[in-house]
């Protein structure tokens, strides 16, 4: 398990002086005294939302901030969630990586799963804990001048960010400052602060501005090749090398495309396997636990939330699921508002991984996240 000092910025966690309004709700360990990083992190978070304060439909995003002096890197993990009233919202975790070894370790782990787990705590934990491993992507390097403006893609962008950071480390270059997702039309300001900006336009104005500044998708990155030290080439070799560059660029672009396609297929297959395992875990839950909880309280909201979760359990464990895991692509949202109601009613129980409500909601949330991955890989989105 990897533990990191972190910031968290949201509008759901209560803290003295801020309440549940937007703001930094935790600055643990070494970050408690880093006012420079606090300012940069607040600026990062301020650039995420659109001009009307809206950001949604992205699922999860990855970015990062390079300190203006000294070493280290603040990896920024953004996840969609809900506010204290159950309305759509988001939360940002700034994970402090004091050296390249720590950053590579977190790139080889599931930071999104850890962020979702941290959201379950009623108050921010003392450190950010990452457990689930991930395979490292093929490193990429920028081949154009910065800033680069890319359209955000829920499926491909987080993996692309990991590959860019890994590529910079492999080349021993400065780590790029990356704005992981933004719905804002203030892209000129973003480009002054970040090397790569992933744009997620949600209104006509933001779309127009993005189209004016967007970078060509097929001429931004290339797969990082190993460079073997040796003698300088002679003039003839240099001329042949220059002549071969167009063909090499086409070949590298094709290779990069094949890597992305292969990654998509592999991710879908892994997600389908995860669905089967997660359905089995949900099938092992006992609905009598929730019925007993509902019978013991005089709270209509809690009783309705338990009833909805039991209905979801029956739908998931029914015969229509047993035949194929593809049902998850078109499944209705799982957990969601009922779990929010239970978390508000039983905050202490959500700090206990073995409690009834925590086990039920964690199981539904894991399956819903996997379903989102399948929908992205299938090119499907919900109309509702």
Image (cartoon, rainbow, N blue to C red):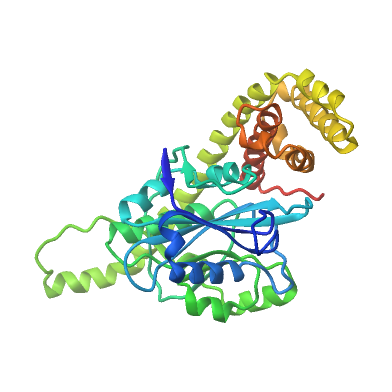
Q: Quadrant of residue 20?
A: bottom right
Q: Can residue 57 be seen in this snapshot?
A: no
Q: Can residue 99 be seen in this snapshot?
A: yes
Task: Report the front residue among 371 and 15.
Answer: 15
Q: Quadrant of residue 100?
A: bottom left
Q: Position of residue 214 (x, y in %)?
A: 56, 74
Question: Where does the N terminus fall, quadrant-wise?
Answer: top left
Q: Position of residue 73 (x, y in %)?
A: 39, 61
Q: Position of residue 358 (x, y in %)?
A: 67, 32
Q: Is residue 332 left or right of residue 119?
A: right
Q: Position of residue 198 (x, y in %)?
A: 55, 65
Residue ID at (43%, 49%): 4
Please say if 265 is above or below 69.
Answer: above
Q: Quadrant of residue 373?
A: top right
Count of number-bearing discs: 0
Task: Report the front residue among 327 and 174.
Answer: 174
Q: Is residue 32 left or right of residue 272?
A: left
- Residue farthest along the left direction in this orientation: 231
Residue ID at (65%, 76%): 185
Please say if 360 is above or below 163.
Answer: above
């Amino acid at each position: 398990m990897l533990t990191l000092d972190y910031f968290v910025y949201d509008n759901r966690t209560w803290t003295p002086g801020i309440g549940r309004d937007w703001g930094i709700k935790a600055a643990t360990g070494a970050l408690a005294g880093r006012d420079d990083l606090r300012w940069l992190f607040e600026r990062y978070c301020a650039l995420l939302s659109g001009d009307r304060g809206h950001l949604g439909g992205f699922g999860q995003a990855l970015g990062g901030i390079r300190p203006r002096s000294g070493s280290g890197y603040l990896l920024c993990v953004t996840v969609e969630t809900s506010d204290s009233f159950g309305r759509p919202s988001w939360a940002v975790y700034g994970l402090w990586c004091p050296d390249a070894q720590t950053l590579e370790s977190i790139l080889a782990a599931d930071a999104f799963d850890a962020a979702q787990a941290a959201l379950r705590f009623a108050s921010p934990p003392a450190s950010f804990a990452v457990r689930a491993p991930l395979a490292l992507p093929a490193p990429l390097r920028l081949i154009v001048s910065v800033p680069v403006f890319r359209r955000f893609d829920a499926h491909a962008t987080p993996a692309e960010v990991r590959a860019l950071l890994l590529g910079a480390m492999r080349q021993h270059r400065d780590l790029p400052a990356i704005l992981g997702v933004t719905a804002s039309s203030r892209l000129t300001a973003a480009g002054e602060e970040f090397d790569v900006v992933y744009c997620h336009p949600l209104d006509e104005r933001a779309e127009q501005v993005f189209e004016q500044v967007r970078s060509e998708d097929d001429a931004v990155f290339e797969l990082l090749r190993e460079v073997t030290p040796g003698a300088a080439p002679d003039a003839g070799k240099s001329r042949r090398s220059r002549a071969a560059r167009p063909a090499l660029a086409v070949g590298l672009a094709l290779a990069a495309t094949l890597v992305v396609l292969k990654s998509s297929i592999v991710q879908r297959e892994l997600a389908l396997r995860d669905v089967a395992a997660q359905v089995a875990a949900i099938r092992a839950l006992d609905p009598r636990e929730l019925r007993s909880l509902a019978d013991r309280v005089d709270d209509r909201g809690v009783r309705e939330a338990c009833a909805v979760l039991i209905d979801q359990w029956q739908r998931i464990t029914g015969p229509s699921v047993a035949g194929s895991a593809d049902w998850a692509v078109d499944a209705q949202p799982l957990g969601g508002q009922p779990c929010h109601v239970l978390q508000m009613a039983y905050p202490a129980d959500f700090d206990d991984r073995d409690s009834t409500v925590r086990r039920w909601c964690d199981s539904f949330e894991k399956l819903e996240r996997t379903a989102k991955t399948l929908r992205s890989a299938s090119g499907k989105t919900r109309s509702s």
